[in-house]
Image (cartoon, helix red, strand yellow):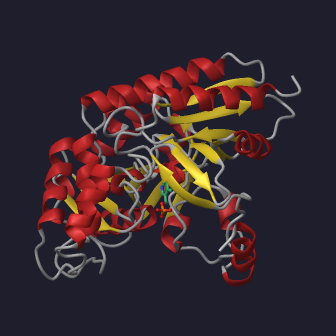
Amino acid sequence: MNAQQMKEDAGKYLANTYGRFDLALDRGKGATVWDKDGKEYIDLGSGIGVNALGFADEGWIREVTKQLGKLAHTSNLYYTAPCVRLAKELCERTGMRKVFFCNSGAEANEGAIKAARKYSHDRYGEGRYTIVSLQNSFHGRTMATLSATGQEVFHQHFDPFLDGFRFAPAGDRAGTLAELREDVCAVILELIQGEGGVVPLEPGYVEEVAAYCRAHDILLIVDEVQTGVGRTGKFLCCEHYGLQPDIVTLAKGLGGGLPIGAVLFSEKCADTLGPGDHGSTFGGNPAVCAGALEVLSRLDAAMLDAIAEKGQYLHETLGKLPSVLSVSGLGLMVGIELAEGRNARDIAVRAMEKGAIPLTAKAKVRLLPPFSITWEELEKAAAILCECLEEGE
Ligand SMILES: *Cc1c(COP(=O)(O)O)cnc(C)c1O
């Protein structure tokens, strides 16, 4: 199937839910990817923060295929080793106590929301069910996670939303504490708002909200679907903040390219969900967990340091340009704020013409390269971005 035929059939047969770029990808290796016409690109998006080890990583392919040849899927009616090993590994690396596996970020947040409500219901009975989320947040596309998403653009057309969600102003201490009333069972937040435009929360603000939550037995849920699993140069972004939350959600980068979500519970709520309270047919799928175990085994101190260093390089290189107002984010999660008159999507399209594939988030150009991107690829991609950003300057 050639690219033209593919695009025509996509228009005809795929639900029209995405504003796709005009790019038909064929194969990749590491941070390099080729389109159907054989043109080469450097990948700065990793499938929206998913392909931690890049495309077609040999170790990851070996582990997943080895598992596919043994057991691809069993359901959670039985024990399988990859799922148990992955849960243990995640707990050991994060200090959390128990893990629930599902298949996406939205599902992980659904699980967190259900657990928070049950925790409160078990202890305090009816009426204490409100989840406070932050303005400009993104937590997913299911009805509950949309209800928790603090961006109006996602709220059109789908009324009514779930009861029991309120939004607090991100970064505003007094405004946030004012929302933490008697009816609140949990706060959910991203430490760096990703889809909202790579906007980090101030550590002082997070510390105050966390302390208030601790004092009032309000669960703190940190959505690390995008920031987690090494993306910011630490295993969890929480480590940058010295934060030990009650619940952490993971997804995107965890599977290295296969769908997985995880809800990590601290001691406090480790046994809140019991048999029959929650479940997922595919959750903890052995092949997917084998891939995730390979991601974790490769994500050692040296790789985390390299992520931080590569991120630093992008901050310095791009931050110097007159057309760039600011560079935000940590590690390989980078947001580029553009000067007046510049459009992020136009710049992304120009970069693709020149052989690099960035993302956008709101008005920013956003970069989420695979961790395995080589220095040579990174320098080449940065040069392309600089050219695009400086055009017409
Ligand atoms: C992507 C994302 C989600 C949703 O994940 P899906 O796998 O698309 O359901 C939730 N929270 C954050 C912070 C995200 O970046």
In the image shown, does 77 or 210 lie closer to the viewer?
77
Q: Residue at x 76, y 32 (%)?
A: 388
Residue 237, percent from left and from top: 37, 37
Is 316 on the left-hand or right-hand side of 106?
right
In the image shown, does 51 or 206 lie closer to the viewer?
51
Residue 52, percent from left and from top: 40, 46
Q: Residue at x 89, y 27 (%)?
A: 392
Q: Is residue 177 above or below residue 58?
A: above
In the image shown, does 3 or 313 lie closer to the viewer?
3
Residue 382, percent from left and from top: 62, 28
Q: Is residue 271 visible?
A: no
Is 106 on the left-hand or right-hand side of 215?
right
Q: Is residue 376 visible?
A: yes
Q: Is residue 173 above or below residue 35?
A: above
Q: Is residue 71 above or below residue 49?
A: below
Residue 49, percent from left and from top: 48, 49
* Quadrant containing the N terminus in the rendered view: bottom right
Count of number-bearing discs: 0
Q: Residue at x 39, y 65 (%)?
A: 259
In the image shown, does 386 or 322 lie closer to the viewer?
386
Q: Residue at x 75, y 44 (%)?
A: 353
Q: Residue furthest front?
A: 38
Is 208 on the left-hand or right-hand side of 320?
left
* Quadrant containing the C terminus in the rendered view: top right
